[in-house]
Image (cartoon, rainbow, N blue to C red):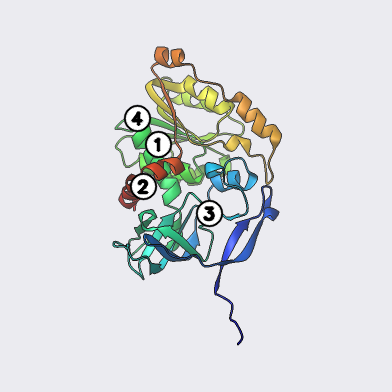
């Protein structure tokens, strides 16, 4: 009797660290749905700057090593649920996330706790862009940054995913002024998105640019760059201000890993002196959405639901 092959799914697999050639589309087994899982027919995937860190081997969650299916977030329609799933049903449109990767696939298995039902009017493309960027922006601005009325905020890489989300969330609070760095070609878009004072990160000095408009500095800085930019940021941080470190994009110099840029950025990221923090009345902190979501899955889920 002729055996039939089990159905497969298409996945984007990272075979080893490096350039684009290290990713390929492969046929993979469809995962078994466990008691608290759902199986999602993926319609759109989110692509984040952190995926570059992953591909280049600069950072992976819990040191994951290839080969594995890439992707942190997606959206689609639920086609199967485990027997303990009680809030999501087959046919629901959901956005979902997994910090152990696996979202760049035509069928993705995720825990029910990592899914939110999408509003009727939301497209799959929009849904797939929400979990990582908007949750990071929300927790850094409101959780660590203490955003409130009248604050001034500097967002590094305002045209990036987290920067874009953070700009929008800043204006949920009344009378917040946003400084945002990007290339000049993106000024029009970032201003339309809510940046009040765009800053050229290529030829300009963000410290001088902020001081020329707001001599006392800003209340919150979201630093996705690291390196010398992180070290200089505190020069424009007001007393009781918060500098939140969320990324290392200065380590990226192109398609493939640059050991020079990695070491340069690491070297220029100066240690923070506790005595300096005490004397300047500053808070310097960091945020990792993956570790936060792992230890606080309910808060992650409720926050994404609040955002959508």
Cα separation, mark 3 vs mark 4, equals: 34 Å
- Compare residues 186 and 168 and report the one nearer the observer: 168
Name the N-terminal-most of marks 2 and 4: 4
Q: Earlier in the sequence, mark 2 or mark 3?
A: 3
Indicate the quadrant where residue 120 lies: bottom left
Q: Residue at x 42, y 37 (%)?
A: 196
Q: Closer to the camera: disc 3 or disc 1?
A: 3
Mark 2–mark 3 Cα distance, whole angstroms, equals 18 Å
| Pointer 3 or 4: first along the chain | 3
Residue at image position (61%, 28%) is 266
Find disc 4 in the rendering and name its residue: 151
Which mark identifies residue 71?
3
In the image, residue 83 above or below residue 215: below
Q: CA distance from mark 1 to mark 4?
A: 14 Å
- Residue 14's x, y, as percent? 63, 54
Q: Depth check: give the residue in front, 216 or 155.
A: 155
The quarter of the picture where the N terminus appears is: bottom right
Could you give the CA–CA distance between mark 2 and mark 4, rounded to whole angstroms? 29 Å
Query: Badge 3: few (under 14), some or many (20 or more) residues near its Cα, within 10 Å?
Result: many
- Real-space CA distance between mark 1 and mark 2, rounded to the nearest whole angstrom: 17 Å
Which mark, residue 297?
Answer: 2
Q: What secondary structure is found at the residue carrying circle 2?
A: helix
| Label 3 vs label 4, nearer the camera | 3
Q: Secondary structure at mark 1?
A: helix
Residue 205 visible here: no
Judged by depth in the image, the label closer to the viewer, 1 or 2, is: 2
Q: Label 2: few (<14), some or many (≥20) within 10 Å?
A: some
Residue position marked by numbered label 1 in the rendering? 140
Q: What secondary structure is marked by label 4?
A: loop
Where residue 80 sits in the image (x, y, percent)?
40, 69
């Amino acid at each position: 009797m002729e055996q039939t092959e089990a159905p497969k799914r298409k996945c984007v697999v990272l075979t080893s660290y490096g350039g684009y050639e290290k990713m390929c589309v492969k046929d993979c087994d469809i995962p078994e749905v466990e008691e608290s899982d759902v199986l999602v027919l993926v319609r759109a995937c989110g692509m984040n700057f952190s995926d570059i860190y992953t591909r280049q081997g600069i950072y992976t969650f819990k040191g994951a090593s290839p080969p594995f299916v890439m992707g942190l977030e997606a959206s689609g329609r639920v086609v199967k649920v485990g027997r303990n799933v009680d809030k999501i049903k087959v046919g629901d449109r959901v956005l979902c996330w997994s910090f152990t990767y696996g979202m760049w696939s035509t069928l993705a298995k995720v825990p029910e706790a990592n899914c939110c039902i999408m509003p009727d009017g939301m497209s799959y493309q929009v849904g797939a862009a929400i979990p990582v960027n908007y949750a990071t922006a929300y927790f850094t601005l409101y959780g660590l940054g203490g955003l409130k009325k009248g604050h001034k905020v500097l967002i590094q890489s305002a045209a990036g995913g987290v920067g874009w989300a953070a700009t929008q969330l800043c204006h949920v609070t009344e009378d917040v002024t946003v400084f945002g760095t990007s290339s000049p070609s993106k000024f029009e878009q970032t201003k339309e998105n809510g940046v009040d004072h765009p800053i050229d990160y290529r030829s300009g000095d963000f410290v001088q640019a902020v001081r020329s408009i707001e001599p006392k500095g800003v209340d919150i800085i979201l630093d996705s760059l690291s390196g010398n930019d992180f070290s200089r940021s505190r020069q424009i941080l007001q007393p009781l201000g918060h500098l939140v470190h969320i990324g290392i994009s200065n380590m990226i110099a192109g398609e493939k890993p640059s050991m020079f840029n990695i070491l340069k950025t690491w070297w220029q990221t100066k240690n923070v002196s506790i005595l300096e923090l005490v004397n300047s009345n500053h808070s310097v902190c960091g945020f990792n959405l993956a570790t936060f979501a792992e230890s606080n899955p309910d808060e992650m889920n409720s926050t994404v639901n609040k955002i959508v």
